[in-house]
Image (spheres, rainbow, N blue to C red):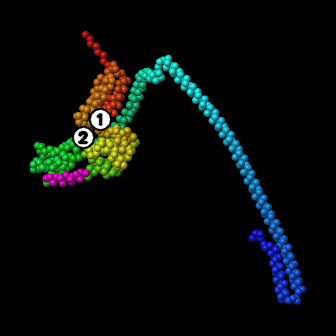
Amino acid sequence: MGPGMGMPPLVFLFIGLVVGIIGTIILVVITGFGAGKKAEKIISAAKKEADRNKRDSLAELKQEQFKLKQEADREVKERKQAAEEAEERLLKREKSLDNREELLQNRDASLDQKEANLTALQKQVQEKDNKMDALIKEELEKLEGIAKFSKEKAHDEIMKRVESEMEVEIAEYIKDEMAEAKLEVDNQAKDLLVSSMQKYSMDVANLQTTSTISLPNDEMKGRLIGREGRNIRTIEAVTGVDLIIDDTPEAITISSFDPYRREIAKETIETLIKDGRIHPTRIEEIYDKTCKDINQKITEMGKNAIYELGLSKMDPELVNYIGRLNFRTSYGQNGLQHSIEVANLCGIMAAELGENVNLAKRAGLLHDIGKSIDFETEGSHVEIGKELAKKYGEDEVVINAIASHHGDEPQKSVIAVLVQIADTLSAARPGARNESMEKYVERLAQLEEIGNSFKGVEKSYAMQAGREIRVIVKPAEVDDLTSIKIARDIKNRIESEMQYPGTIKITVVRETRAQEEAK
């Protein structure tokens, strides 16, 4: 039985018997065998008590068993009911799954049927296509046999005829569209360029190949020459310049194509004149000190250029390369001033177009950075500048602007286009650059050669210092629309084959004259 129930009646019976026996024994021991009757009464009473306890215990036991049976029956009934409900749910779910499976089987059967129908239709279509191709091929062969003309030849003949008939219409359409587009683009471009040039202006400063040094007196000329010319030879040897000492009073001239060498030589000689001690050893000492001072001066020039443009921090070595541009020239134009001018023009145009102004200025300042060391490294200044920009971690836009400002690579951003435009503006300003006569004549000859190379051209003339080419065509061979095409083709040839500052205007002239002589 469970732990919460009372002691079983049998136990009580057993205990009662034990108590009665023990009581009898005690009574016999106390009273002796002489009290037998009393003992029998006690035993009889004990037996009756034991029987009564036994009956009570049995009754309690039966009642407890009845309760347990009722509880067990109720629990069995509840579990049976729960099991029946679960079984009913499972039967319903199984029935639902059976229905779904039946639907899926029906759907699969329907899809299989549709797929079979589609395959049959595709087969029929393919057969019809094959029959159609065969019929078309047969018809083409019959037509070629009748016309004695192949398909390819007929196609070429039709295209030639269409091209011939539509040539005038196409040319007129192109003319109208180009005129409209050019008018719109030209107006916007002119407004932008004029606005940029009005907002920015810089003095034109051409550098020459000579520098003049003033002397305190003519006696200093003799001291610079030295005994048997040893001083002047030492100066020319260490500085790499030519020292011209002539009859000009109280002045000497330094000549060199390299502005960097010329500046070092000028500083060295001026220091020697102030010092007064002029001999070969002193010349070499002053030259070494001047080289160090000039290098510091170059770095300061680079820093000033960056500060003037309001640009962010650059690598110190790149700053030094920027300063070196002050001693580089292009057709007499100072390299650093040209780069600063390009940077400012780029910034103004970028602001007008809504582009990144600082990035545009940075690209403009660094576009010619390769010229600072192009005499030390193999390769063009474009390639050198591109590698320098990569080395010092410049933005991809800046790298592309450097690489594309002379058309060596395609331009990938608006800023790259602005750098090219600003570079051309800075170089093409009147007086900005000195061009040698040889280059000038060569450019004019190339312009006229390109113009004369087209069919129907009678004569070409390069005008306005090479900024315009006027082409005279034969009116009997070239009509008005063809004249427009010739002008466009000449423009494309010039852009792809020539290097020139600024822009070149192409004018094609077609003129018909009728003459008679009255006698």
Q: Quadrant of the N terminus?
A: bottom right
Q: Which of 472 and 1 is in front in this view?
A: 1
**At numbered mark 1, what does the secondary structure look like: helix, strand or loop?**
loop
- Res 500 label: 1
- Residue type at mark 1 is Tyr
- Distance between the alpha carbons at the discs numbered 2 and 1: 16 Å
Name the side, left or right, on which 334 lies relative to 478. left
**At numbered mark 2, what does the secondary structure look like: helix, strand or loop?**
loop
Q: Which of 160 and 485 is in front in this view?
A: 160
Residue 288 in magenta stretch: yes
Q: Give coordinates of residue 128: x percent, y percent.
A: 58, 27
On the question of residue 365 being in view, the answer is no
- Res 332 label: 2
Q: Give coordinates of residue 463: x percent, y percent.
A: 27, 29
> At x 39% / y 32%, what residue is drawn?
184
Residue 154 in magenta stretch: no
- Residue type at mark 2 is Gly
> At x 83% / y 76%, what residue is drawn?
13
Q: In which quarter of the image is the C terminus?
A: top left
Say how many tags the image has: 2
* Marks 2 & 1, CB-CB < 8 Å contact: no
**Residues drawn in magenta:** 278-295
Q: Nearer the viewer, residue 160 or 127?
A: 127
> Where is residue 502, by image quadrant?
top left
Q: Give coordinates of residue 323: x percent, y percent.
A: 28, 48
Q: Give the mark nearest the N terminus, 2 or 1.
A: 2
Q: Which of 519 and 4 is in front in this view?
A: 4
Up/down of 455 relative to 299, above or below: above
Name the side, left or right, on which 102 lies relative to 473. right
> At x 76% / y 58%, what residue is drawn?
78
On the question of residue 382 being in view, the answer is yes
Q: Main secondary structure of the magenta part?
A: helix
